[in-house]
Image: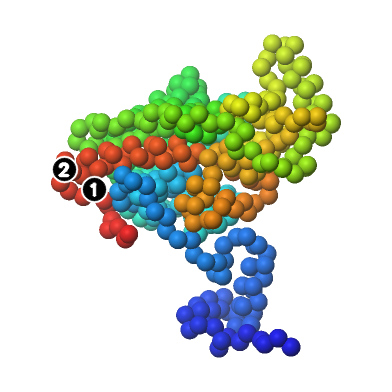
Amino acid sequence: MAKQLLIRDVPPRVKSWIDTKRKAEKLSQNQFVIKALEKVCAEGDAPTLFDTPISRPEPLPGSMPFNFIDLFAGIGGLRIGFQRMGGKCVFTSEWNEYAQKTYRKWFGEEPHGDITKIKPKDIPEHDVLLAGFPCQPFSIAGVSKKNSLGRAHGFKCMTQGTLFFDVINIIEIKRPPVVVLENVKNLKSHDQGRTWRVINSNLEEQEYWVFDAVLDASNFGVPQHRERVFIVCFDKHVFKERPDFQFPTPSNNTPRLRDILDPNPAAKYTLTDHLWQYLQEYARRHAEKGNGFGFGLADLNGITRTLSARYYKDGSEILIPQEGKNPRRLTPSEAARLMGFDKEVARFLGFKDELPIVVSDMQAYKQFGNAVVPAVSTAVARQVVKVLAKQFFQSGRCLLKATMTM
């Protein structure tokens, strides 16, 4: 019979942890250990107390230390960029349980939940506030869907559109020197520009210098046409004059779709005859009406359409041609690379090869379709850090709102 592991065999620090936790839950040692092991077994690839902690990644050249918070974090696309430029994340909020699972695995941290349930005063002091607040109420696809269902969109959408004002409440109370917001391009044109005017005026009323630009991810090394608006704000109480902030310029890297494709994707990603026939008929009907709706057969030597959160439904916006058979969907790993969650990002986060996908295919497509491209957030973060460094040297005083631990 194999030797049994007894509580006395474990290190004192672990035994102390077990005693503290089991007493709080009013469990015996045996009950608590069995519960912990069952949780490990059920979660599979999710991080557990038995995992090797993810090492703190090394920042890029030109970085500087600062604290930031990551709101509406998703799977951390914004965070990665600012962490690469020397930032330390001191608070995260993400309500979706599947995104939380991915975030835990990638960053080794447990995100806080619904931001509307968190008091601003309980959020740590920070130098930069990041928020990719929900885009569905403002996106073209989101507005079309809500219109078809007779529902409100934009700020009239009480479940998502008003979350921007939760961000404003945090800004008003915590006064971060820098605020970085990200959303869909349609944010600026939504409701004939009224939505944008509300956002801009609220940020200016908080006494921030406001900069905005639409950036296309295809200009930053990923083979995907993906336009997103970035809003970068600087506190006028800290930056007495309008900073010389410049949005990043496109890189010289020309991406190709074929460079991120798997050599031997599983057969399950090939469209069935029924679905392929349906998509072709759907496109034909709309073409006859003069509409541009329909599937997108990707150019392997070029870039794709925008990957959306609905990709899991039929994959129609980005189909990969296959010689002699029906086209196929992207695999989840290909979707990750199409969004720039590549081997370089994986190594930065402490993984040997690719980032692990710990959710179902459907949830993975949703997560990548809603994510921020790390290469774009890194480029924006680099420009923000330049302003922080210049302000530091010109003012001769530290801007940091809390002592950093490097």
Please name the amino acid that badge 1 sits on. Leu
Q: Residue 38 at x, y = what percent? A: 67, 70
Please name the amino acid that badge 2 sits on. Ser
* Image color mode: rainbow
Q: Residues within 10 Å of mark 1 (few under 14, many from 20)?
A: some
Label 1 – label 2 distance at C-alpha: 9 Å
Q: Residue at x 61, y 87 (%)?
A: 6
Mark 2 lies on a secondary structure that is helix
How many badges with numbers are in the image? 2
Mark 1 touches mark 2? (CB < 8 Å): yes
Q: Residue 308 at x, y = what percent? A: 61, 34
Q: Residue furthest right?
A: 274
Q: Residue at x 27, y 52 (%)?
A: 401
Q: Between residues 135 and 6, which one lies in front from this camera angle?
A: 6
In the displayed structure, 298 sits above or below 127; it is: above
Task: Left or right? Give the position of 84 relative to 30.
Answer: left
In the displayed structure, 39 sits above or below 127; it is: below
Mark 1 lies on a secondary structure that is loop
Q: Is residue 206 visible?
A: no
* Quadrant in which the N terminus is drawn: bottom right
Q: Is residue 209 visible?
A: yes
